[in-house]
Amino acid sequence: MQIPPQRRPRIVGAVAAASAFVVVAIAVAIVARPLHDDRTVIRFMRRRPSDWLIDLASGYSTVAGPVTVIVVAFVGALALAVRDRTIGRPIAVLGAAWGAVAVAEIAKRIVDRPRPPLGWQLDGPATTPAFPSTHVAGLTALLLVAALVTTTGKNRIGGRSRIRMVLVAAAACAALGMGAARVYLCMNWASDAVGGLLLGVAAALCAAWSVGRMVHRAPEPTV
C-alpha cells in the first residue's frame, strides 16, 4: 500500500530512530562499561553540584517518571476516546507511551548495563540496569505522540502546522530536560538518556503514523 507523501516522514523517522536505538544498544552491550563521552559528561556534572538544581532535577524526575507517564497516558487516551468515539488516537497514545516504557524495561534486561556507582547517585540508591532510561523514553513518547495526534486531521491543514511546531518543541524541551536531570543526578549515563530519547521518538512517530493513516481513511468525527 502506498504511503501518503505527507505521512512518509513519520514512518521514515520512526525507522531511523529505532535503528539508531539498536545501534546504541549494541555499542553499549559490547563495550559493557561507560562510553568515553559518558565519563566526560558525568565528570562535568559532578564538578558542578548545586543544591537547588539537585532538588529541581529530583522533583522533575519523580513527578514526570514512568508511573506518571503510564497514568497520564491512560487518562489522556480515555479523554480522547470519549471525544472521538473511535479508538485511533487513544490507542496511539497508549501504544506509544506504554510501549516505550515496556520496551525500555525489556531492553534493560537484555543490555544489563550497570548504573553509575551508588556513591555518585543523588536520587538513589538504584541498582537496576541503566540502559535505556525509562524516564526519558516514556516521557518522550507520551509528549511527542500527544503533540502529533492532537494536531492530526484532514480539516486542520491550514492552522495545524504552527501549533504542532510549538507542541513538538515543548515536548523536545521536556524530554531533553528529563535526560539532563537523570544524568545530573548520576542515575543514568548520558548514552542511557540518548537511548531513551531515540526509543521514545521511534514509538511516538510510529504511533502517530498509524493514527494518521486512520484519519486519512475515515472522515473526522463531528462534535
Image (cartoon, rainbow, N blue to C red):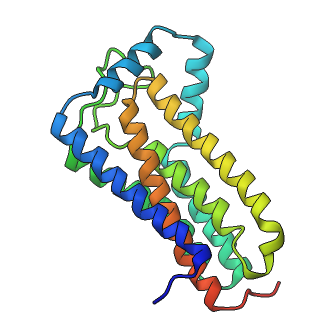
- Quarter that holds the N terminus: bottom left
Say which residue appears at 57% left-offset and 82% top-offset. 4
Q: Is 33 placed left or right of 189 in the picture? A: left
Q: Position of residue 48 (x, y in %)?
A: 51, 9
Q: Is residue 69 visible?
A: yes
Residue furthest to the top: 47
Task: Point out the image quarter for the C terminus.
Answer: bottom right
What residue is shown at x 71% (from left), y 91% (from top)? Answer: 219
103 lies above or below 173: below
Q: In front here: 211 or 82?
A: 211
Q: Is residue 85 above or below residue 199?
A: below
Residue at point 51%, 82% (across, down): 3
Foreground of the two, 215 or 134: 215
Please, is residue 152 above or below residue 196 in the view?
A: below
Q: Judge whether 5 appears above or below 137 on screen.
A: below
Q: Tell which of 110 and 36 is nearer to you.
A: 36
Report whether residue 95 is seen. no
